[in-house]
Image (tube, rainbow, N blue to C red):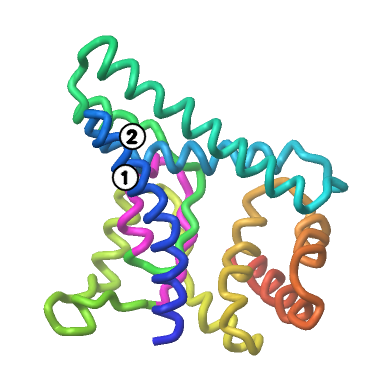
């Protein structure tokens, strides 16, 4: 239950900001259904900024620059809808849908199966999916008003959208390590095997940003995730 509340707060805070942007768009007379695509492009802008920043960059400055890069990338992408809808009188629904389709991903890392299923629209056939199989039941499922998709349905959904799907119980691995909060680091370890970045650099980043009291278990979680193939 605590894990459900934790993830609800994490995802709700992000979606509230996106919804607020949608309200401003609606107030100006533009129906913006490309919010998810804009959100993905904003995240890409922030990730690229972090990639090219020096490892010695001040932590506070890094956060500011990453946020600014995300804002600028999302704003630039949203201008596509503004120009198409206002200047060229294009259908706002079609343009917004196209913008969502443009925001595809190379790797989808999901902490829960239904989270992965909700994001399949962003996948290409050559994308990779890393998914934790531990189920966090939404309210409709826990109250008996709906059924959680079966393992076969989840596998079929992800397999149809991507040619490479890596699924395992990352939550169980984090519990074996001794802290369920390291589940995301377990998944991060698996993600690291798909890049050419040396494991030592990943561990240096974890050491830099994780509190000392939790460092040992987070490093163990990262290495456990790297063992997953």
Residue 133 position by quadrant: bottom left
State the residue at coordinates (32%, 58%). 117
Measured as percent of width and height from the top left, residue 58 is found at 83, 49
Instruction: Using the image, determine if residue 3 lies above or below residue 190.
Output: below
Residue 42, horizontal then vertical, whole percent: 51, 39
Magenta-tinted stretch: 115-134
- Residue 118: image x %, image y %? 31, 56
Question: Is the Cβ of the residue at disc 1 closer than 8 Å to that at disc 2?
Answer: yes
Q: From the viewer's perspective, is residue 112 above or below residue 94?
A: below
Q: Furthest-top residue in view?
A: 88
For the residue pair 184 and 84, the one nearer the viewer reads as: 84
Residue 124: in magenta span: yes
- Count the numbered circles shown: 2
Q: Residues within 10 Å of mark 1 (few under 14, many from 20)?
A: some
Left/right placement of residue 135 relative to residue 188 reads left
Cα gap from disc 1 to disc 2, whole angstroms: 7 Å
Q: Which residue is mark 1?
A: 121
Mark 1 and mark 2 lie on one chain; the one further toward the N terminus is 2
Residue 101: give its label.
2
The residue that appears at 48% across and 34% down in the rendered structure is: 74
Residue 119 painted magenta: yes
């Amino acid at each position: 239950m605590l894990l459900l509340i934790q993830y609800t707060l994490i995802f709700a805070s992000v979606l509230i900001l996106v919804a607020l942007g949608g309200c401003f768009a609606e107030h100006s007379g533009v129906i913006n259904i490309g919010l998810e695509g804009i959100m993905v492009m904003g995240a890409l802008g922030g990730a690229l900024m972090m990639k090219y920043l020096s490892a010695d960059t001040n932590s506070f400055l890094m956060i500011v620059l990453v946020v600014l890069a995300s804002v600028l990338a999302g704003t630039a992408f949203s201008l596509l809808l503004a120009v198409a809808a206002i200047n060229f009188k294009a259908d706002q629904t079609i343009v917004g849908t196209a913008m969502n389709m443009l925001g595809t991903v190379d790797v989808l890392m999901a902490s829960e199966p239904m989270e992965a299923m909700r994001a399949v629209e962003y996948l290409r056939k050559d994308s990779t999916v890393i998914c934790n199989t531990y189920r966090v039941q939404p309210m409709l499922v826990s109250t008996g008003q709906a059924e959680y998709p079966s393992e076969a349905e989840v596998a079929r959904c992800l397999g149809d959208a991507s040619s490479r799907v890596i699924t395992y119980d990352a939550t169980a691995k984090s519990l074996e390590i001794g802290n369920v909060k390291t589940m995301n680091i377990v998944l991060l370890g698996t993600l690291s095997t798909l890049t050419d970045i040396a494991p030592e650099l990943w561990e240096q980043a974890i050491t830099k940003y994780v509190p000392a009291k939790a460092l040992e278990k987070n490093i163990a979680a990262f290495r456990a995730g790297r063992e997953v193939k």
